[in-house]
Image (cartoon, rainbow, N blue to C red):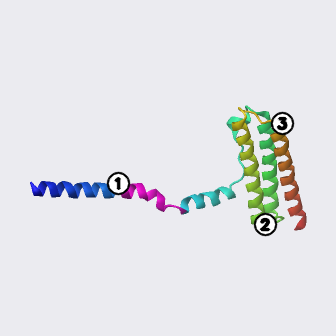
């Protein structure tokens, strides 16, 4: 009887240890999201097609962001801007796009006039920043 209890205790202990290890395993991988984030910064802007077709304001923002991406890529290839400057400009483009999506989510699928004008202002500032960086080199 004692041997059955000791075997059951060992089995329960082994099971508890394996479950605890399985739960703790995802906590050890903290470098993967940072690496994925860094890889995402190097990716060019990709417009979101499901929302774009349903929202003309988002389509306009995506169109302007795509044009900015083409300019960034061309300027980077020609050496007018550094990799860091291109990364910063792309990050700002993603922030603008995410702000537009947030506005859509908060306003039942539309971008209010004030938000839309603010986003267009940020796009104009992004384009101006790209031009300034290009003219400095």
Determine which of the numbered discs, if any, sits on residue 113 in the image.
3
> Which quadrant does the N terminus fall into?
bottom left
- The residue carrying mark 1 is 19
Q: Residue at x 77, y 36 (%)?
A: 111
Q: Closer to the N terminus: mark 3 or mark 1?
A: 1
Residue reaching furthest right?
A: 135
Q: Closer to the N terminus: mark 2 or mark 3?
A: 2
Secondary structure, mark 1, is: helix
In which quadrant of the rendered view does residue 128 lie? Answer: bottom right
Q: Position of residue 87 (x, y in %)?
A: 74, 60
Q: Position of residue 86 (x, y in %)?
A: 77, 60
Q: Position of residue 99 (x, y in %)?
A: 74, 45
State the separation of the CA atoms marked 3 and 1: 52 Å
For the record, the magenta segment spans: 20-30
Q: Residue at x 65, y 55 (%)?
A: 40
Would residue 25 be found to the left or right of residue 48 on screen? left
Q: Closer to the N terminus: mark 1 or mark 2?
A: 1
> Which quadrant does the C terminus fall into?
bottom right
- The residue carrying mark 2 is 82
Secondary structure, mark 3, is: helix
Label 2 crowding class (10 Å Cα cut-off): few <14, some 14-19, many 20+? Answer: some
Q: Position of residue 35 (x, y in %)?
A: 59, 61
Q: Nearer the viewer, residue 65 or 98?
A: 98
């Amino acid at each position: 009887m004692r041997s059955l209890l000791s075997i059951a205790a060992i089995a329960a202990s082994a099971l508890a240890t394996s479950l605890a290890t399985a739960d703790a395993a995802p906590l050890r991988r903290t470098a993967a999201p940072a690496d994925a984030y860094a890889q995402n910064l190097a990716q060019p802007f990709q417009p979101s097609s499901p929302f774009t077709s349903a929202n003309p304001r988002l389509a306009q923002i995506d169109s302007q962001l795509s044009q900015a991406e083409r300019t960034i890529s061309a300027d980077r290839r020609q050496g007018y801007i550094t990799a860091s400057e291109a990364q910063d400009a792309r990050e700002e483009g993603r922030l603008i796009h995410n702000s537009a999506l947030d506005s859509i989510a908060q306003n039942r699928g539309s971008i209010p006039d004030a938000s839309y004008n603010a986003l267009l202002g940020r796009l104009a500032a992004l384009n101006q920043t790209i031009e300034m960086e290009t003219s400095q080199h």
